[in-house]
Image (cartoon, grey):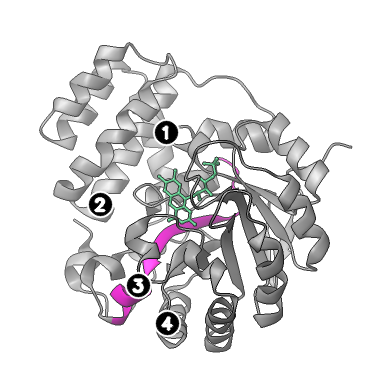
Amino acid sequence: MLVDLRESWRIGPVEVPSRVVLAPMAGVSVQAFRRQGRRFGAGLVCSEMVSCAGLEHHNERTLGYLRVAGDEHPLAIQIFGSDPAVMGEAARMVEAAGADVVDINFGCPVRKVTKTGAGATLLDDPARACSIVDAVANAVAIPVSVKMRRGLENGSRACLEVGPQLVEAGAQTLTLHPRSARQMYTGTADHRLTTELVERVDVPVIASGDITSRAKAQAVLATTGAAAVMVGRAAQGNPWALREIVDGDDAPPSQEEVAAELILFVRETVRELGERRAGSFLKKFYGWYLGRGRFPKPFKQELVQLATTDEVVERLFAAAPGAAELVERLAAELPDPADELVLDSMPISIYGGG
Ligand SMILES: Cc1cc2nc3c(=O)[nH]c(=O)nc-3n(C[C@H](O)[C@H](O)[C@H](O)COP(=O)(O)O)c2cc1C
């Protein structure tokens, strides 16, 4: 049975207009990435994980993750931490920033996070995990979702035990990335667990892991009964993957289109992060956009070595002159950055955005 990927579904009161969700990815899911994801058909986009301790201490860089643009909605902002009260407070800030959903990270396998009792370790401590969800759900009016791995150790089925308890505690959607924390990104996502989780809870489940094509998305949705699929690595430097998955449009982008999207991405990211941070942040994206046989390999090397993003943009225009018209058209459709909703306490340096 073929599933309609353009069908809408709901997280509590929030309507999600397609069954494809753009994954939260640390070091990737900046506002420019999320806005582009929405343009290419993602029904919901997510921020990267934001430290609740950083929010509690009003750390300037952490607060910057709460910038929400008008064309991102619906948007989930993801928080991580281990203290229920601090997580509740962070959730209030997320709501005040304009997010439609607050997502809780119980999946991060990275030691820097797990050693603080946050991320995937919470799957080993269901009581604490539930108090976090309860504290967050009581702190905000927007719906709460949780993203988790299958468990800590290979073969673990912890998600099936913990998942229903999290729903009981107030989670209105669960995302499952069915790899263990130990696996990191090796092996494959075992979506048989997703099927089992769907059977055990009465809230929508989002299936995350190895969704790289429309065929894979259709197969996972049909076999698991999940409400939506989440796309992560396949969309890095490749928003066209989202279009293929959502609409079945598998026409490869022209060089002009690739250059235009990258130029817009560079400009928007510089506006968001400032030239210095954006300069190093963007380098990995050059390979992601220009690879896949779209441009000759040495071109990426050349871009990575340029000193400023202005030079990068100049080289891209020179390589694909037809991109200029496309960039102009795309830029004209973007909303005015002044419409962004930001917290009153947001430092001016972040508000300016560079
Ligand atoms: C670079 C990178 C950063 C990630 N950061 C986060 C994160 O901040 N929060 C989270 O819940 N998952 C994070 N993930 C996991 C993804 O959201 C997703 O579950 C995982 O990559 C599997 O999906 P994929 O096969 O489509 O990439 C990250 C993944 C990658 C590759």
Quarter of the image that includes the N terminus: top right
- The residue carrying pointer 1 sits among few (fewer than 14), some (14 to 19) or many (20 or more) residues within 10 Å by Cα, namely many
Frontmost of labels 3 and 4 is: 4
Q: Judge from the rendering whether residue 85 lies leftward or rightward of residue 58; answer left or right.
A: right
Which residue is more in the foreground, 153 or 222? Answer: 153
Category of crowding for the residue at label 2, using alpha-carbon neighbours closer than 10 angstroms: few (below 14), some (14–19), many (at least 20): some
Q: Are marks 3 and 4 in contact (CB under 8 Å)?
A: no
Numbered tag placed on residue 237 in the rendering: 1
Q: Does the magenta stretch include residue 53?
A: yes
Q: What stretch is highlighted in magenta?
A: 40-56
The relative height of residue 234 versus residue 293 in the rendered view (above or below) is: below
Secondary structure at badge 3 equals: loop
Q: Which residue is drawn at 59% across and 51% down?
A: 177
**Disc 2 designates what residue?**
271
Question: Which element type, helix, strand or loop, lies under badge 2?
Answer: helix
Q: Going by the picture, which residue comes out furthest to the right?
A: 1
Which mark, by number, is residue 342? 3
Residue annotated with mark 4: 83
Amino acid at circle 1 = Gly
- Residue 327 drawn at (x, y percent): 37, 33
Q: In this rendering, which labeled residue sits more in front, label 2 or label 4?
A: 4
